[in-house]
Image (spheres, helix red, strand yellow):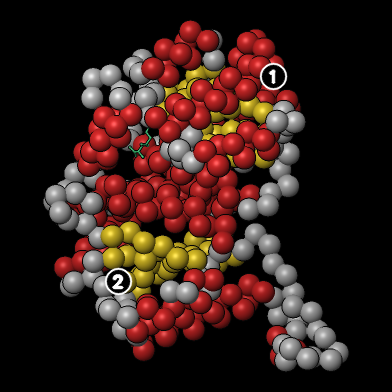
Amino acid sequence: EEVQLMKETAAKLREKVDVLLVCGIGGSYLGARAAIEAINGLYSDDKVEIIYVGNTFSSNYIHQVAKYIEDKDFAINVISKSGTTTETSISFRIFKEMCEKKYGKEGARERIVATTDREKGALKKLATDEGYVTFVVPDDIGGRYSVLTAVGLFPIAMAGIDIDEMLKGAKDAMVKYNDANIETNDAYRYGVARQLLNKAGYSAEMFVTYELQLNNVAEWWKQLYGESEGKENKGILPHSAVFSTDLHSLGQFIQEGSKVLYETIFEVKNPQNDMIIPSDPDDLDGLNYLAGKSVDYVNKRACEGTIDAHVNTGNVPNIIISLDKMDAYGFGYMVYFFEMSCAMSVYFLGVNPFNQPGVEVYKKNMFKLLGKPGY
Ligand code: PA5
């Protein structure tokens, strides 16, 4: 029923607006951003532009977004499980006021959707009082595991992506990885491999993709693993790079620097788009040997050559994880794979993958400095 309501609400709002502001931070936005950019690309021609706010205290950024949307028709999806996250609350207050000034109270009500706890928190109360359409963050799902709930699915639907297909991908992965055999379950094999590397002295994992539009998949993955594992003075530092771009900055360190890291190559076999390298009669750049080949062909050879260089010459262990295609189905499948593998891997380390006690420390200091009552 909730998925149906998400689809209906998204279809109606998509008719109305040019821009959706997704207002959330950490687990309340990274999964949606990962999906939307991975599937639609970085310069999407979808009719609704998605802009992320509520993830920073940067006055420059918030000001620029406010200017940018001034003359555009916009809606807001505010997402916060606790309903009290300061970054999200400040941005929401600013953009809600802007929305009400532009469309009036009633118009704003039609353009604001809240995703929050079933009953607790300031956002829940505000959403009920204002009469916003509200989606629920399930009690037993933490932020970094929540992309396949309304937290991720509603903004993903607003970006014109088929959320039924995404859930189908996740469901098929759930069936596939419901297998206790460590020899055949790839999610478990990945989880175990990373802990064996950790025991062998590798304290950092570099998640590598060869697609710029997967950068936020890496950001989502970093939160998933970092926040699940980094406690009790244990855990592997999650790091990421986009190759070949970052080979021109980090490549030297990986090849010949201190042996602290291993790489996890997340390879997508078939790109959504490809281009043929043209022939040039003068061949002044000497590239005619590639004329008629596709850019993705070159990307794949760069990947093969780099794996060989890092593994066989640089002695950097590599784990390779492949996905056929990054579409809605593939994204859902990938999410389930990494979430299951993460929980398994972290349990293997003897740590609880589902809490995050350490993230409160900076907030207490900040609230004290800001003079928040009670701190
Ligand atoms: O995974 C987590 O718990 C965090 O990243 C939270 O998602 C993030 O801090 C936002 O919290 P909330 O959804 O309560 O605003």
The crowd level at tag 2 (other Cα within 10 Å; few <14, some 14-19, many 20+) is many
What residue would you read off at disc 2? 261
The image position of residue 189, as x and y in percent, is 28, 62
The quadrant of the picture showing ligand 1 is: top left
Dot 2 amino acid type: Leu
Label 1: element kind:
helix
In the displayed structure, would residue 3 be above or below residue 146? above
Q: 339 or 260: which is nearer to us?
A: 260
- Residue 8 higher or lower than 34, as above or below: above
Kindly indicate the quadrant of the structure image that contains residue 368.
top left
Decide if residue 310 is in sight here: no
Q: Which residue is mark 1?
A: 102
The front one of 362 and 113 is: 362
Left/right placement of residue 342 relative to residue 323 reads left
Q: Position of residue 232 (x, y in %)?
A: 14, 49
Q: Give the numbered dot on residue 130.
A: none
Q: Where is 30 relative to 273, above or below?
A: above
Q: Nearer the viewer, residue 309 or 255?
A: 255
Q: Residue at x 23, y 25 (%)?
A: 375
The extreme right residue here reads 281
- Please name the residue shown 62% across and 78% down the image: 298
- Residue at point 52%, 38% (across, down): 59
Measure the C-alpha gap from mark 1 to mark 2: 51 Å
Residues marked 1 and 2 touching at CB (< 8 Å): no
Please state which of the two labelled residues, at mark 1 or mark 2, is closer to the viewer. 1
Q: Secondary structure at mark 2?
A: strand
Query: How far from the left and from the top, in percent, is residue 87?
Result: 43, 33
Give the percent coordinates (x, y) of residue 220.
Answer: 42, 49
